[in-house]
Image (tube, rainbow, N blue to C red):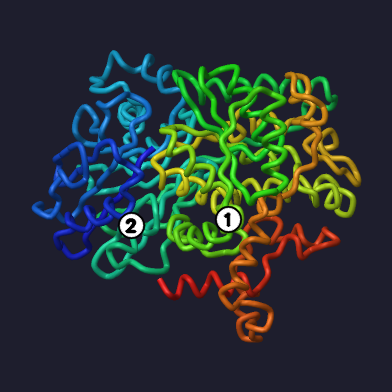
Amino acid sequence: MCGIAGVLSKCGGNVAPLVGSMLFSMASRGPDGAGVSFEGKVIRSESVADLELEMMTAKSVIGHSRLAIVGGTCGTQPFRSCDGRFTLEHNGEIYNYKELKARIKDRHTFLTETDSEVIIHLLEEHFISCHNFLEAVKRTVAELDGVYALAIRDEKENTTVLARDRLGVRPMYYAENEQMVAFASERKALWAVGLKEPTLRVLPGHALVIEGANTQPQVQIAGLLPARVIHRTMTSAVAAYEKALIAAMKKRTQDVQRIGIIFSGGIDSVLVAYLASKMVPEVICYTCGVEGSSDLEFARQIADTLGLKLRVNELSQDKVERLVPEIIRVIEESNAGQIEVALPVYGAVELAKKDGIRIMLTGQGADELFGGYNWYSCVAEREGYRKLRRRMAQDLSLLYKETLEREDKITMAHSIELREPYLDMFVIQTSMEIDLRLNIRSSDRFGKRVHRKLAEKLGIPYDVAFRVKEAAQHGSGMHDMLEAVARKNGFDEEAITAHYLTELQSKEKMGSSQRYGYLFEKESKLWVAEPHVQMYLDTLVQKG
């Protein structure tokens, strides 16, 4: 994991100091080393400050700060191809890098043991065979089993390609004005050099080509493979899922001695924690919520039942009030639904940071893959399973901006790498090969039945595997707590104007609960944040 930043001048101006400002703005993403590439040179150092970018002069610079996970201390980027033509920066994890390296190592000079260096030499291989930069990138990412955001320079042609993995697990943003085009792992890096809205995303599975300093339309270079239903019995489905999930967990825990789990007590995080405890010497679960909340109660009970080590962060109203502005800054978002979910995650990760944890696992993605949301059974009943499959596919495709970017920024704000076993490509493929009727029944209280059955098969008690869990913002108590904070600061129903309501209705809806789920719920208020809470958050943003 790391931070990527780059600036390309449109008018020949010196942009080197700007890259320094960008990297400093997201310093927690890369505390273990830094590097830059400019005018055919690569400079690496132990920190961004040691690069002394304010002393450099260059009209195009790409910079990198590193969180060392794979490859030890010798792995600071950027990396260069053997012939010096291509320069690479990578944010992410490639789980099949050892296999790829074994295939090509005799034809290349490797300087490190990192997964990232393998990518540049693989790109070099494909470019030799196709002589087309973008096509070489496309062929390269097709071989990567993992997650990535890439910035790759063709120094000979003065062309840059930004690429993002299929689901957008790792972020990449860009913006431009009359003087320059810039890109970075976080928006705040773009804001640091005066590039305000619109800041744009490189879309999941897409590449942005920048010729000189001129951006071209994004092109798709990767996507989810089409799937047909293979598993029509519970026995077949559970067996296939077990094979895929255990393989995904092994990839994400190989060579790891100590790992943290973002733990809510729901079956998604419980299953991840349970499997991790069989694979990693030390596993610590972290949970956060309001004192007396159901998530904390169940997390304690389940951890005790399964023999899992648990650390709990209980937040008071005063602590929540202090945290909210920081969370807005970190996740670069003030949507109330996002803040409510971010609060318990931030509190859990904060504890992990104090314990010196460097890698955490999350249960994100299981609901979208196996049908965990309450409204999915209602969709199946009213609209049919074919329409439900389309809705679930859309929910999966939007995870990048509704969940993944938020949690990437929270963990990286604490210099922790987050890994997502349910979003392994083979787990996703397997989920799509399972008949939806096995997971979701009409008027189903549970959903995710294949997921729950696997948990039970592996040894998790039935009452844990089939517990119906509240949404994170409610189970943790953060929904009500955030409303209490808003009211304390003078924001209630009477503060809302007709003009503000109109503005609010025009904002993008984040999460399937806000986009359409509430239409299928009798108590829709549970899924839509109160307007006065959103007004409070918007006011905090305006105050800076």
Q: Position of residue 393 (x, y in %)?
A: 68, 46
**Residue 66: image tag:** none
Front-lying residue, 68 or 224: 68
As helix, strand or loop, the secondary structure at mark 2 comes to helix
Numbered label attached to residue 316? 1
Q: Which residue is mark 2?
A: 189
User: N-terminal of the two: label 1 or label 2?
Assistant: 2
| On screen, residue 515 above or below 254 | below
Relative to 43, residue 383 above or below = below
Report the Cα–Cα distance between label 1 and label 2. Answer: 32 Å
Q: Is 283 displayed left or right of 521 in the figure?
A: left
Q: Nearer the viewer, mark 1 or mark 2?
A: 1
Considering the image in quadrants, where does the N terminus appear? top left
Q: Position of residue 327 (x, y in %)?
A: 48, 57
Task: For mark 1, give the secondary structure.
Answer: loop
Q: Quadrant of residue 131?
A: top left
Q: Residue at x 54, y 29 (%)?
A: 284
- The image quadrant where one finds the C terminus is bottom left
Residue at the spot 69% in from the left edge and 55% down from the top edge: 512
Instruction: Tell me residue 300's x, y (percent).
Output: 67, 35
Q: Amino acid at mark 1?
A: Ser
Q: Is residue 365 above or below residue 540?
A: above
Specify whether 434 is left or right of 30.
right
Q: Position of residue 121 (x, y in %)?
A: 31, 27
Q: Name the amino acid, label 2.
A: Ala
Name the residue at the bottom extreme. Answer: 498
Q: Residue at x 25, y 21 (%)?
A: 110
